Amino acid sequence: MSKLSTKYLGLELKSPVIAGSSGQTSSLEKIKEAENCGAGAIVLKSLFEEQIEHLIASSGGPHSYPEAEDYMAYYIKANAVEDYLNLISAAKKSISIPIIPSINCISAGSWIDYAKMFENAGADALEINIFFLPVKGETTGSEIEKSYLQIIEKLKSKVKVPIAVKIGFRFTNILNIIELLYKRGVEGVVMFNRFYEPDIDIDKMAVVPAEVFSLPAERRYVLRWIAMADALDFKIDISASTGIHSGDDAIKYLLAGADTIQVCSALYKKGIGFIKEVNERIISWMEKRGFNSINQFRGKLNYSAVGNPILYERAQFMKFFSSHD
């Protein structure tokens, strides 16, 4: 067994480094390359229901017939899903590491329909990418959380493969939502989702997309919550996502308590070979410190393991500066 061997969602992985959902996991050629570079698993590029609906909406003209519009809507959706199912099937036949489809939907029914089809196509697990943007002032946080939990309850009643839920860090109490997901049978959480954010171009006087790739500094948003989630009384697998741009970043997440690390932005910037670079750095670091397995140091610096947990709790600058006269 390799020094990097680990478990995630009940699956045996040869490395904790996962090729995260991105354009770099959208074709069989790239998936094979990721496996050759040492990826422990592949999360396929997300199937976005919203994108499918956008294609359907833009396919009709001002003089379209209702019958033609219905046919085009069916054709576009059926082909998008069929292409995705074919990718799952082809990947399962071509590589030996786990394949995890990713679903990003805007309606509860679609999540269930797609999840069942992906399971039947041979998926080893599913990653459910959920984010509801509250655009109405009267919508409460508890209502949004309830929507998440209802989706998960329906999914767990329909599929048997393990489920990881990719969440954002904007919940009022992240640890509580993780516990609620765990109590509904969710096997893992991915921390955290990154969303498209708006920016303003002052020359064009227009709203434009902000930078879509993560930055190393974003790691600070993730480390705290992984360390605290790993210290909870119950055990749910944690996959770190966002801010992983070096092997050292991966090691930090593992020390905080992550079971796996998902690389995405770095694959765009550095290529799929980055996975091999991260694996080599983890191994060299382990050998230097006498670790023979991931489990020997994973979570060694989580919230309950450090001597001064206030370091993870500190949230205000005043607390920092008051200790640095």
Image (cartoon, rainbow, N blue to C red):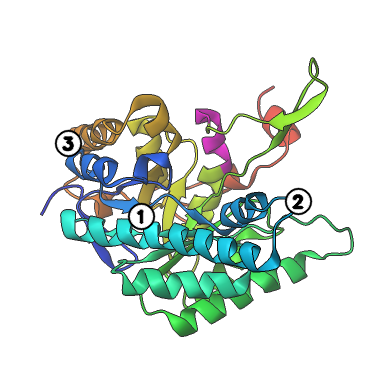
Q: Which residue is mark 2?
A: 62
Q: CA distance from mark 2 to mark 1?
A: 52 Å
Q: Which residue is mark 3?
A: 287
x and y percentages locating residue 84 in the rendered image: 39, 58
* Label 3, residues with CA under 10 Å away: few <14, some 14-19, many ≥20: few
Q: Which residues are magenta?
A: 215-221
Give the residue type that dot 3 points to: Glu
* Label 1, residues with CA under 10 Å away: few <14, some 14-19, many ≥20: many
Checking the image for residue 259, the label placed there is 1
Nearer to us: label 2 or label 3: 2
**Element class at badge 1:** loop
x 79%, y 14%: residue: 203
Pointers 2 and 1 in contact (C-beta within 8 Å) = no
x 40%, y 72%: residue: 117
* Residue 312 is covered by the magenta coloring: no
Q: Height in image: 83 above or below 177?
A: above
